[in-house]
Image (spheres, helix red, strand yellow):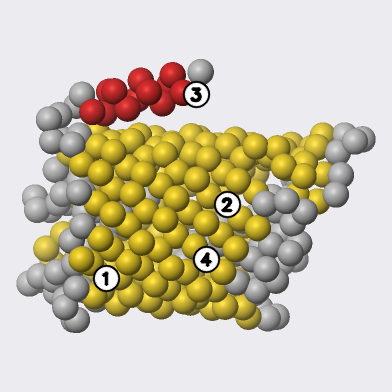
Amino acid sequence: MKKIIFAAALVAVMGSGASAWFDGGLGMTTGPDGYSRTDAYITVGGDSMWIKPAMLRQDADGLANPLNTYSVRVGKDAPLFTVAGEAGMTPATEYSPGVDYSSVFFGGDITFSLTPSGSGKGRLAGPNSRITSGGGNGITQVDLGAGLKHTAHKAETALADYEAGQTEFSVFAGAKVLMLRLGGSWTGYKYGDDDVFSRVNTINGQALALIGALPKSSVNLRVDVPATIPMVTPFASYTRTAFKGNTDSASAYGFGGYVDLNMVGVNVAYQILDDGSDSDSYLSLSAGLKF
């Protein structure tokens, strides 16, 4: 059934226009305590529709087995907006002896461009943002949007099953101002039963961290400086995440650069995660191909 749905979506996308395009990438992140993350995605699109299947794999010394997450996004681009929906799952995995974790999620988002020069293939903020090169004069593009995502977490043991729902609501905005590309987002989290604490939680920015607590809200800020060095776009980011309970807030500081060689792109990032009592470093490297 999954293959049939994916094939139908792909046919619909490719039938949306005569001009097909491809964008694919692979990334890896390493950190302390054996943490590793692998991201892989492929995006295939027509004139206005696109589909993006992706896989995320995470492992660490504290996990009995790696966690694999599979997802697919389908979207539509227009000059003044991009709308997309997504769905995915983490199959049941024994991440701790005697405990299986699994999840399913779905959501959607929309991004509006307030400037006539806006392009669906170059949004400045949100899930559909992409790194682009080149600056401008004055304020040349302003994008803003919102998204909603619901995740059903489940933990299974020999004695009982535990479930909890997690709903994320996010708002985001971005702008090109002179030579700078600015972006920011705020995400709030609501929960049903708190019986299940998701083992792997998202820290927006360049890395995922094994926190073992439920996020309450997060703020992310990012600045890119295109055109300062030929083919290279340096960037910096800051994320502040608050958690439920007695867990201290975490701050993430990211620095890196993106090399644009037209059909090939390479992204290198370094992130420092400070959880209030200790700080850890993460290194990310990714490469992509587009045509």
Gap in angstroms between the C-alphas marked 1 and 3? 36 Å
Q: Amino acid at mark 1?
A: Val
Residue, disc 1: 259
Residue 283 rendering spot, x and y as whole percentages:
50, 73
**Residue at image x 43%, y 21%?**
5
Q: Residues within 10 Å of mark 2 (few under 14, many from 20)?
A: some
Q: Nearer the viewer, residue 103 or 41?
A: 41
Q: Which mark is residue 29?
A: 4
- Secondary structure at numbered mark 4: strand
Gap in angstroms between the C-alphas marked 2 and 1? 25 Å
Gap in angstroms between the C-alphas marked 3 and 2? 20 Å
**Residue at image x 47%, y 76%?**
270
Q: Is residue 107 above or below residue 178?
A: above
Marks 3,2: beta carbons within 8 A: no
Residue, disc 3: 2
Residue, disc 2: 57
Q: Nearer the viewer, residue 148 or 255?
A: 255
